[in-house]
Amino acid sequence: MKTTKKFILTEQEMPTRWYNIIADMPNKPLPPLHPGTREPIKPEDLAALFPMGLIKQEASTERYIDIPGEVLDLYRSYRPSPLFRASALEKAIGTNCRIYYKYEGGSYAGSHKANTAIAQAYYNKLEGVKKMTTETGAGQWGTALSFACRHFGIELEVFMVRISYEQKPYRKIMMNTYDATVVPSPSELTESGRKILAEDPASPGSLGIAISEAVERAAADAEVKYSLGSVLNHVLLHQTIIGEEALLQMNKAGDYPDIVVGCFGGGSNFSGISFPFIRENLLNGNKTRAIAIEPASCPKLTRGKYMYDFGDTVGLTPLLAMYTLGHNFVPAKIHAGGLRYHGAGVLVSQLLKDGLMEARSKLQKDCFRNGVLFARSEGILPAPESTYAITGAIDEARKCDEAGIPQTILFNLSGHGHLDLSAYDKYFSEELEDHALTDKEIEESIAMIR
C-alpha cells in the first residue's frame, strides 16, 4: 500500500515574487560579451532578440521581482504544484533517509518549462510582438512556449533538435496542436542549418545548433523576437517559484532538506528548486547541499572548462562565462534531450566555481533503471531528464545510509514521461546504450573554441 504524503499550498499561499540570486552571490558572474566586439554587452545590443522587460530582468540585481498579475493568473491553472514525501520509494530502496520531491508535471506542458514560457510570452505581448522563434531539445520547452504564445496571440516557430524530433513525434504533434510551426534542426531554412548539413548531412542536431537557427531567424526580421528555455538569468529567475513554494511546503511537512537535487541541462529546473535554498545558506547560515545531476555523455559541469564561450554553435549569441564542452560539441543521442546542451548558465557556473553547489554525472541506463523503480513505487512515470534527479537522490540516500547519518533529501521531479514511452520501450528492450566522453574528446572540443 502506497503511503506517500502530499503537501499542498492554497492559491492564496502561492509566492507572488521571483527570487534573483545574483543579489546575494558573493561573487557576481562575469558580464556577457558581444559576439562581434568581444566587449561587455549593452542592453540595447540585446533589443533585436528580446523585449526590454526581459532584458531588464536579465541585468537586474534586485533580490525579488514581482510576478505580473496576468502571469499569476495562468500559473494558477497548475500552481502551486504539490510536494510529496516519497515513502514508497524510501521503502523500495531501504533507506533511513527522508526523501521528498516537488512534482512539476501537472502543467499543460507536463513539465516546469511553463513557468518561464508564460512569463516570456507575456513580456513579448506587452511590447506588441507578433512572432517569436525558439529551439527545443526533448520538446517540453517548445510545448510550453507553444501554448503560452497561443494564449497571448503570438505566432511561434520552433526549431526542434532533429534526434528528438525523430524520437519524440508526439511532442511535435502537441506543439502543432497549440498552433506552433515545428522544424527539425539542423534545417535548410537557415544559413546556420545549411552549413551544418553540408558538413554532416546525417547530423542528429544539438541545442546549440537549434539555438543558432532560431536566433538567425529572429535577427533577420525586426518584427520577430527570440526566446530561450534555459541558461539565461531571466529564465532561471522565473523558475524560482518552484523552490519558493518548496520552502513553504517543507515547513508544512515539519522538515528541511539537507540536500537538494535537480537534473541539469542548461540550469532552469536545478536553479528553480535550489536557488531559494542557496539563499537561505547565504543569508541565514543554513547548510543545505545543492547537487546538479548531468549526463555522463554531456558533462560540462563535471568535466568541462570554465571560460567564455558562445551559447550557440555558429557563434551568433553573446559569449558567456560558463562551464562548457565547446559550442561545436554535439552530444550523444541520449533520450534525455533536454540535457543535451554544451554549456551551463553563468549563474550556476559561478556558484559551482565558488563551491556553493556540487555536480555529478550519471549514465543513461542507470537513470532509466531508477526511473522505472520510481514509477513502480511512487506511480508517476518520470521524464527521462527527471530520472537523473531521481538517481542523484537515491545515490545520496545510499551514501547517507552507509555513513549512518540519515538526512532529508529533496529533488525536483521536473516532468512526466507520458510522451517518452518509446524511450522506456528501448530500455525494456535493452536497446539503450551508455556513453561517456573520453578526455581526448573533451580536449578536442574545447580546443575548437575561437
Image (cartoon, rainbow, N blue to C red):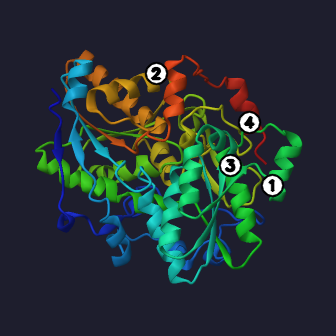
The reply to whether the C-beta atoms of the residues labelled 2 and 3 are less than 8 Å apart is no
Asked if one can make out residue 222 in the rendered structure from this viewpoint, the answer is yes
Left or right: where does residue 349 sit relative to residue 87?
right
Q: Which mark is residue 445?
A: 4
Q: Which residue is mark 3?
A: 208
Whether 237 is drawn above or below 43: the answer is: above
Depth check: give the residue in front, 13 or 379: 379
Which tag is nearer the camera, tag 3 or tag 4? 3
Q: Quadrant of residue 303?
A: top right
Where residue 430 appears, as percent x and y from the top left, is 54, 16
Q: Amino acid at mark 4?
A: Ser
Classify residue 39 as left or right of residue 344: right
Query: What is the distance, in whole Å, between disc 2 and disc 3 at their CAs?
Result: 26 Å
Query: Would you say 371 lies left or right of 447 here?
Result: left
Considering depth in this image, is 411 or 84 the residue closer to the camera? 84
Could you tell me which secondary element the residue under label 2 belongs to? helix
Q: Quadrant of the N terminus?
A: top left
Q: Which residue is mark 2?
A: 366
- Give the distance between the C-alpha atoms of the residues marked 1 and 2, in whole angstroms: 35 Å
Q: Is residue 20 above or below residue 166?
A: below
**Mark 4 to mark 2: distance in Å?**
26 Å
The reply to whether residue 233 is visible in this rendering is no
Label at residue 192: 1
In this orientation, which residue lies closer to the viewer: 221 or 45? 221
| Between discs 4 and 2, the one toward the N terminus | 2
- Disc 3 and disc 4 in contact, CB within 8 angstroms: no
Of pointers 3 and 4, the one earlier in the residue sequence: 3
Mark carried by residue 450 = none
